[in-house]
């Protein structure tokens, strides 16, 4: 019995020693595991992982409790079997009380860990709420960035269709400018030619008016020459009649003188007087001679022929000037009509060019506005991208 009791005491002692060592090691391992996991759990983002750690800690505690109960049962069995003394029983009770105290301490540690877990859960929940807000802000920033990028793409796509009309209008404007320069040059040349033709027309009209003014004067002078020639001819005829009368008188007086038989003195005087009359009438350059009338008549005839030729020349020049004036006037009218047509066409072309210019200005304004909007959208998109990156960094910091 003593040997058996000693053996049982040894077994009970070893069991208590193992129980004490195991419980101490289990308590230290549980505490270290919980502390380490608590430290790691503070660094984790989610509450679920920390809850899993706490569940594992609960499971370990339950395993330790079951093992403690098993050791208690074994202790009771060994106590019953060994029929230990009251002292041993007290000793075992003390050990059991120590185990209870250790269990109470473990329970306190567990309660403290549970309290810390709840605090960590609250903090994790708050952190999750903050993280959710940050994630919502990140999502909002992404949405804003996506909207800005979509708007940038739309504005950039809207810019390209506006470039082609501007290029076409610029080409059309350049061509119209070249055409306008050509038409302006032609119009300027046409105006210069028209001014020159009008000046020539004015000069020809002046010449025509001068000739038209001179012709009646020359015709009047020609008529006066005719009248003067007729008067001279009448004078000449009168002189010829006078000469004939003198011849007749001379014949008569000679006959009278010879028949009457006058005295020598009277006859001499009569002859002298008759001779003087003969000289007056028969001498061409005498007082009553026809010489100066013939000269005047010839001169007047020469002047009349000159005036007649002048009248004919002026008449021909007037007809030529009239024809030239009418031809040049028709040419001027044609040139004026052509100049008016060219001016009208140039004016219409200027109006078309002005319309193209206005359309070009409108298209350029739209293109400039579209480019400015696209650049502004790109700037906002870049700001949205930077804001998104900053928000993601803040979200990562809040998660950690």
Image: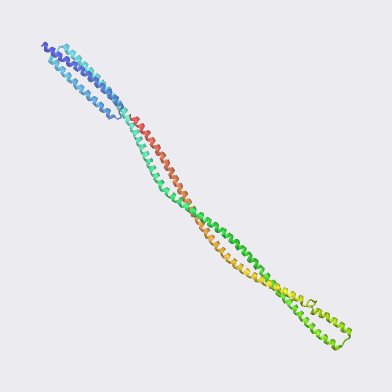
Name the image quarter holding residue 247. Answer: bottom right
Q: Is residue 350 visible?
A: no
In percent of width and height, residue 379 lies at 42, 39
- Total numbered circles: 0
Q: Is residue 29 visible?
A: yes
Left or right placement of residue 155 versus residue 37 in this view = right
Asked whether 7 or 284 is in front, the reply is 284
In percent of width and height, residue 370 lies at 43, 45
Which quadrant is home to the C terminus?
A: top left
Name the image quarter holding residue 188. Answer: bottom right
Residue 348 vs 380, above or below: the answer is below
Asked whether 333 or 11 is in front, the reply is 333
- Residue at the spot x=72%, y=73% of the render? 300
Residue 211 vs 66, above or below: the answer is below
Name the image quarter holding residue 206. Answer: bottom right
Asked whether 249 or 136 is in front, the reply is 249
Which quadrant is home to the N terminus?
A: top left
Q: Residue furthest bottom?
A: 259
Q: How is the image coloured?
A: rainbow
In percent of width and height, residue 364 lies at 46, 47
Residue 238 vs 323, above or below: the answer is below
In percent of width and height, residue 356 lies at 47, 52
- Residue at the spot x=59%, y=60% of the render? 196
Asked whether 293 or 48 is in front, the reply is 293
């Amino acid at each position: 019995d003593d040997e058996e009791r000693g053996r049982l005491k040894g077994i009970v002692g070893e069991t208590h020693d193992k129980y004490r060592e195991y419980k101490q090691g289990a308590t230290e391992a549980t505490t270290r595991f919980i502390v380490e996991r608590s430290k790691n759990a503070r660094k984790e983002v989610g509450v679920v992982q920390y809850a899993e750690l706490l569940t594992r800690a609960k499971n370990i505690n339950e395993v330790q409790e079951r093992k403690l109960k098993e050791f208690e049962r074994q202790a009771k069995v060994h106590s019953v079997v060994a029929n230990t003394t009251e002292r041993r029983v007290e000793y075992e009770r003390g050990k059991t009380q120590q185990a209870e105290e250790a269990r109470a301490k473990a329970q306190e540690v567990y309660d403290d860990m549970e309290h810390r877990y709840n605090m960590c859960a609250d903090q994790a929940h708050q952190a999750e709420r903050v993280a959710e807000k940050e994630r919502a802000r990140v999502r909002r920033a992404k949405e804003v960035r996506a909207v800005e990028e979509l708007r940038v793409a739309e504005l950039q796509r809207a810019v390209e269709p506006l470039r082609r009309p501007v290029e076409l209008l610029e080409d059309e404007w350049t061509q119209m400018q070249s055409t306008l320069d050509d038409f302006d040059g032609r119009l300027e040349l046409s105006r210069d030619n028209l001014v020159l033709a009008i000046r020539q027309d004015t000069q020809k009209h002046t010449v025509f008016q001068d000739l038209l003014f001179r012709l009646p004067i020359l015709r009047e002078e020609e008529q006066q020459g005719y009248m003067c020639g007729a008067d001279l001819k009448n004078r000449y005829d009168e002189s010829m009649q006078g000469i004939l009368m003198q011849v007749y008188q001379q014949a008569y007086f000679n006959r009278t003188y010879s028949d009457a038989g006058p005295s020598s003195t009277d006859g001499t005087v009569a002859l002298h007087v008759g001779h003087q009359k003969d000289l007056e009438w028969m001498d061409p350059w005498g007082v009553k001679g026809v010489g100066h009338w013939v000269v005047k008549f010839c001169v007047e005839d020469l002047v009349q022929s000159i005036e007649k030729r002048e009248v004919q020349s002026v008449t021909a020049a007037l007809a030529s000037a009239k024809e030239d004036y009418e031809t040049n006037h028709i040419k001027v009218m044609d040139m004026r009509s052509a100049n008016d047509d060219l001016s009208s066409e140039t004016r219409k072309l200027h109006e078309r060019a002005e319309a193209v210019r206005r359309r070009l200005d409108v298209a350029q304004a739209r293109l400039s506005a579209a480019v400015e909007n696209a650049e502004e959208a790109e700037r906002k998109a870049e700001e949205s991208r930077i804001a998104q990156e900053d928000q993601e960094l803040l979200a990562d910091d809040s998660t950690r």
